């Protein structure tokens, strides 16, 4: 039965029968999308403004039928989509799309609860706590850490640094930092490979982007601890306050791993907060044979792990583990009168009690993110997660082996996880020309619509970069991507 817009009235929700039909259609749409994703061009052939023109400038005055809106999803929106879930999308860290996660998102959308306090939805809060424990155990973090879910690692580092700042200057929550002559200049140290989200956090916290001290890395792109010690000692001499060090386990470009244990020793000796950015790399702790890459994490004050990067939970889902979660609570807990009835008023974060997650960050309303993670972790199981991660590492090593055998190619960083950085270095060209060529190869390969990779910089030179993290990616996809790169090298270099 189709219902005309005029029949729907102007109040209430869409009639149940029409909604049910639309939901069935949508479920079929999503299933078809997943099943046919491989047949699509990865990057769309749209011009800037084309989607906007298709959508139309003005919001409709009158109701429109769902059938028409769903039709426009295909006609107007889909032509402007980059298919991140395509098995040959090898940009960034791959994509974490998968079936069980999709079910979790549908359920969370239907429920639309806010996990701000335990009472506002006990299951949302308790499942979050359970899933946080599962992840902690899965990646091998000790039980001395307690987690909280945020949307992204960028927001997680903001909270970690806010806690570090409060630990160093206990009354910032109340008095702020403006106009205070009693506060020294605070400095935060990270390698030259650390993610830029740190800078954003410094901007938001009023600590200043200039107070990020970038430390050099060694030939494997790991932080030089000697350089770190030197920079800290220098700052102390100048009267600055070393506030925090960010060590990275799995850097953005090459997945290199900083020597966390050594860094932690320096932090302990000088009473400096240690935050470990394991946003991508934390997943490696699932693999027993690679768990040594997590060495020293137990010494950190805070650790971020993003299941939306490599633990098969789609955007967005980031977990921050704190040794002293009360520090966050002391900093952010603020219960306005209208929420007092729903707040549990608990004073500690000890597990098993009614936690109000709104107390642990800047967000009040919080999505029921744990649902999708729970569905994925149950549907794949620990063994399934382990097998998939192991396969991604094997694929990365396989690609590295092909690169190793290809003349005029070089591997630009050790392959530690599921990321491979490489460069085409034909003779008779200077490095700047090679930079331009490598960038052009990536652009041309991506323009084919059959593969997607990214380029980045390592040691001052442009590199091509492939990240593997999609459950659909197989060796055949990787081989096809590599063949495409080789074909573009030949085509562009011969010109
Ligand atoms: N840390 C690392 C190592 C990253 O590679 C990234 C993003 O790629 C981030 C942090 C920021 O992640 P998010 O997008 O969750 O803020």
Image (cartoon, rainbow, N blue to C red):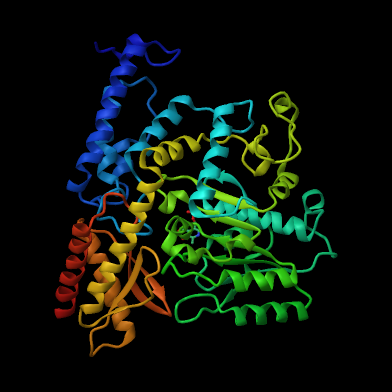
The C terminus lies in which quarter of the figure? bottom left
Which one is in front, 290 or 52?
Answer: 290
The image position of residue 85, as x and y in percent, is: 30, 48
Identify whether 297 is placed above or below 335: below
| Residue at 64%, 63% in the rendered image | 299
214 left or right, relative to 109: right
The image position of residue 353, as x and y in percent, is: 68, 34
226 left or right, relative to 394: right
Q: How many numbered discs, if any?
A: 0
Residue found at the far right of this picture: 182
Identify whether 225 is placed above or below 160: below
Q: Which corner quadrant of the image does residue 414 belong to?
A: bottom left
Q: Is residue 84 visible?
A: yes
| Residue at 61%, 40% in the rendered image | 363
Which one is in front, 494 or 90?
Answer: 90
The image position of residue 297, as x and y in percent, is: 58, 62
357 left or right, relative to 64: right
Which one is in front, 350 or 418?
Answer: 350
Residue found at the far bottom of this picture: 428
The image position of residue 18, as x and y in percent, is: 31, 15
| Residue at 70%, 51% in the rendered image | 324
Which one is in front, 129 or 189?
Answer: 129
The N terminus lies in which quarter of the figure? top left
208 left or right, relative to 134: right
Q: Is residue 468 visible?
A: no
């Amino acid at each position: 039965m189709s219902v005309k817009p005029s029949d729907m009235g102007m109040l209430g929700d869409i009639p149940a029968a029409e909604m049910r039909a639309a939901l069935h259609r949508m479920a079929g749409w999503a299933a078809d999308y997943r099943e046919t994703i491989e047949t699509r061009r990865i990057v769309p052939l749209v011009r800037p403004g084309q989607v906007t023109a298709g959508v139309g400038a003005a919001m409709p005055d009158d109701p429109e039928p769902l059938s028409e809106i769903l039709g426009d999803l295909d006609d107007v929106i889909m032509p402007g989509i980059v298919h991140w879930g395509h098995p040959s999308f090898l940009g960034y860290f791959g994509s974490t799309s998968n079936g069980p996660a999709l079910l979790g998102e549908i359920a969370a959308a239907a429920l639309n609860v806010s996990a701000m306090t335990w009472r506002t939805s006990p299951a949302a809060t308790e499942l979050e706590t359970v899933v946080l424990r599962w992840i902690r155990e899965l990646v091998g973090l000790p039980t001395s850490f307690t987690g909280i879910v945020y949307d992204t690692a960028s927001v997680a580092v903001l909270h970690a640094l806010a806690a570090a700042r409060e630990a160093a200057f206990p009354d910032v929550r109340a008095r702020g930092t403006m106009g205070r002559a009693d506060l020294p200049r605070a400095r935060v140290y990270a390698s030259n490979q650390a993610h830029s989200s740190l800078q954003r956090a410094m901007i938001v916290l009023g600590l200043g982007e200039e107070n990020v001290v970038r430390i050099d890395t060694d030939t494997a792109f790991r932080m030089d601890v000697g350089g770190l010690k030197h920079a800290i000692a220098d700052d102390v001499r100048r009267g600055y306050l070393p506030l925090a060090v960010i060590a990275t386990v799995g850097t953005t470009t090459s997945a290199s791993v900083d020597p966390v244990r050594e860094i932690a020793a320096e932090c302990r000796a000088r009473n400096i907060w240690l935050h470990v950015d394991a946003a991508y790399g934390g997943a490696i702790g699932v693999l027993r044979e690679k768990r040594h890459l997590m060495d020293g994490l137990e010494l950190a004050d805070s650790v971020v792990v993003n299941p939306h990067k490599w633990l098969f939970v789609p955007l967005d889902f980031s977990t921050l583990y704190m040794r002293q979660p009360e520090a966050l609570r002391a900093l952010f807990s603020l219960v306005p009168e209208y929420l007092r009835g729903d707040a549990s008023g608990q004073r500690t974060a000890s597990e098993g009690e009614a936690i109000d997650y709104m107390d642990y960050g800047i967000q009040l309303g919080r999505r029921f993110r744990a649902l999708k993670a729970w569905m994925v972790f149950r549907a794949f199981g620990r063994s399934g997660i382990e097998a998939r991660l192991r396969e991604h590492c094997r694929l990365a090593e396989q690609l590295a082996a092909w690169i190793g055998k290809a003349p005029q190619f070089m591997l630009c960083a050790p392959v530690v996880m599921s990321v491979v950085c490489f460069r085409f270095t034909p003779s008779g060209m200077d490095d700047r020309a090679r930079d331009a060529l490598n960038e052009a190869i990536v652009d041309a390969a991506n323009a084919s619509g059959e593969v997607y990779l990214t380029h980045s910089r390592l040691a001052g030179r442009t590199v091509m970069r492939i990240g593997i993290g999609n459950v659909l990616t197989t060796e055949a996809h990787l081989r096809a991507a590599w063949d495409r790169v080789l074909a573009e090298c030949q085509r562009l270099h011969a010109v």
